[in-house]
Image (cartoon, rainbow, N blue to C red):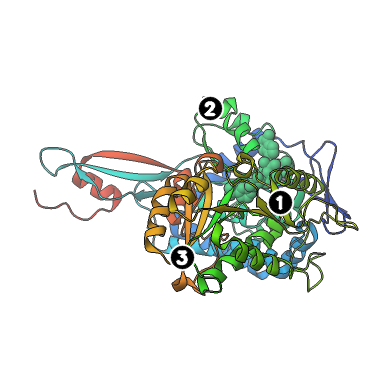
Amino acid sequence: MITLQSYVHGQWVAGTGAPKTLHDPSTEAVLGQVHPGGIDFAAVLRHAREVGGPALRALGWKRRGERLKALSALLHEHRDALLDIATQNGGNTRGDGKFDLDGASGTLAYYAKLAEALPEGNTLGNTLVDGEGVQLGRTPRYFGQHVFTSRPGVALHINAFNFPAWGMGEKMACALLAGVPVVEKAGTPSALLAFRIAQLVVQSGILPEGSFQFVAGSASGLLDLLGPMDAVAFTGSAATGALIRGNANLVQRNVRVSLEADSINAAVLGPDVEVGSDTFEQFVANVVVDMTQKAGQKCTAVRRILVPAALLADVQEALLERLATIVVGNPAQADVRMGPVASAEQLRDVRAGIDRLAAVAKVLRGGSQPVPGPGYFVQPTLLLANDSHTPVLHELEVFGPCATLLPYDGSAAAAVELCNRGGGSLVASAYSDDRAFVEALVHGIAPWHGRIWLGSEKTMGQAIGPGAVLPGSIHGGPGRAGGGEELGGLRGLALYLQRTAVQGDRAVLGRLFGLDAAPAS
Ligand code: NAP
C-alpha cells in the first residue's frame, strides 16, 4: 500500500492525522492512503509567492509556453503507466482513462501553441495588450490602453475526483502560462493518478521550483490564508462550492474565486428529426456515451433527455437497445465498456439519487439495486418522467450512469422552458435540422448555459460529442453550474491576470507596450 505525499515548499511530506484509504473501485482492494493534515500552508504560500512566482514570471510568455509543451510531452511519454493507474484507482476503462489523460496533455499542448503567438515580454514584463487603445483627450496624444499583467499571487486549484489528470492539467495550463504559481489539491478518492503525475512533474524539473506544489490531503485552513492577489479555481459539488465562496477570508479580502460545480445538463431532440436519420443517430450515440463514459461521472454528462412526445417510443427503444450492449465490469478486462463509480460514498449517493428519481419517474432499465460481487457498480439507468416539470428532475444531479427521458410537446418554447429549469448548466446539446427551431432554442437557453452544442445532418462524423470540453471553448456555466468560466483560449488566463487601464501620452504607452506608431494628429 502506498502512502501519498504532498509536494510542498521543495519537499515531499507524508502528512499527519487519521489516514483516508484509496481503493480499487472494481475490487474494493485498498491501494493507498492519505494523511489529511500536517501541511504548513503558510509556508506553502510563501514558497509560491517568493520562489515560484518570480521564477515563473522571469521566463516570459513564450518560454512558459515551452514548459507547457514539455509537460504535455511528459504525460504522453508515461501514458501507458498512467492509464493503468486510472483503471486501478479510478475504475476507468482504457477509453475513459484516455479521455482524462489525453485531455490533460492536449490542453497543455493547446496553451503551449497559443503561447507561440504571445510576446516575449516588454518593458513592463508580463504584459499583454488588451484590445485597441482609445483617444481620451482632445487630440490623439492623450491615450488609454488596457493591458493585462500577471498577478503576483498564488493559484489554488481544488479539483474533483472524476478528472484527476485533465482537471489538474487544464487549470495548470492557464495559471502557469499567466505566470502564476499553482498549488494543486487533488480529489481524494482518485488521488493516486494526480499524485503520480505530480511526482513526474517534480522529477522532470520542467517547472521552476515553487511554481508547482501538490497537496494530497485536505486543503482545510488554506483558504483562510489567501490574499488579494491570489485566486481559487474549484471544481466539485455545488455544496462544497458554496462553502468556498462563503469563506469569510475570501469574501473579506476579495480573493478571486471561480467555481465549476454540478449541472443538470439537457439534450434536446428536435421535432423534425426522423428516426434513423443521421441526426437521430448522433443523438442516440451521444446520449449513450454521456450516460456510460466514466460511468456517468462527468460534469458535462446528459441528465435530462428532452424528446418530443411523438418520438418518445422510438427514442426509448433505440436507447434501450444501445444500453443493453454496454458490458459493465472491471475495466481491466478488455470487453468491459463501463466501469464502477469511484468510491463507496459515490455508490451510496448514486443509489440514493436513483431512488429519489424513481419516485417521480419510471425506471426503464437499471436502477438502484446492488450489483452482486465486490466493487462499486451501478447498471446504466434510464428513467422516464411521469411529469417532465417535476422539480427534482431538474434539481438533483445523480453523478453516475443515469439519465431521465422528459417528453415535451415538440415546441421550442417548451424545450427552452424545461432546459432553463436546470437553474444554469454547463452545456446543453440540441439535435435538429429545423433552422427556426434551433434559432428559437439557442436564443432562449443561451443566457442559462455556458456552452450549447448543436448537432445536425451536416455535423455527422465531424464533431466530438457535447460531453468533451475543448480548450478553445469556455467551460463553465451560470447559476448552479457555479458561475465560473475556464478555458476558452486566452480567456482562460483572465482569472490570473489583472486588467489595468493605462492613460497617458500615446508615445509613452507605445514604447511601454510595443504599440504601433501613433496615427498623425
Ligand atoms: P466535492 O466533494 O465537492 O469535492 C471537490 C474537491 O473539494 C475535492 O478536492 C475535495 O477534497 C475538496 N473539498 C471538500 N470539502 C472542502 C472544503 N471544505 N474546503 C476545501 N476543499 C474541500 O466534489 P467531488 O465529489 O470530488 O466531485 C463531484 C462533483 O463535482 C459533482 O457534483 C460534479 O458535478 C462536480 N464536477 C463539476 C465539474 C465542472 O467542471 N463544473 C467537473 C467535474 C466535477 P476531498 O476529495 O479531499 O474531500
Q: Is 521 on the left or on the right of 58, as rendered? A: left
| Residue appearing at x 49%, y 36% in the figure | 229
From the image, state whether disc 2 or disc 3 is nearer to you. 3
| Residue appearing at x 61%, y 41% in the figure | 390
Indicate if the residue with disc 2 has its beta carbon within 8 Å of ligand 1: no
**Image marks 2 and 3: residues in contact by CB distance under 8 Å:** no
Q: Secondary structure at mark 1?
A: strand
Q: Earlier in the sequence, mark 2 or mark 3?
A: 2
Mark linked to residue 362: 1
Q: Nearer the viewer, residue 231 or 49?
A: 231
Q: Find residue 274 and report its horizontal and vertical position in percent.
A: 51, 70
Amino acid type assigned to the residue bearing label 2 in the image: Val
Q: CA distance from mark 2 to mark 3?
A: 49 Å
Amino acid type assigned to the residue bearing label 1 in the image: Lys
Note whether 238 is above or below 490 in the view shown. above
Mark linked to residue 251: 2
**Image marks 1 and 2: residues in contact by CB distance under 8 Å:** no
Residue for badge 3: 272
Q: Decide: few, some or many residues near mark 3? Use Cα within 10 Å; few <14, some 14-19, many ≥20.
A: some
Q: Secondary structure at mark 2?
A: helix
Q: Residue furthest left?
A: 521
Count numbered badges in the picture: 3
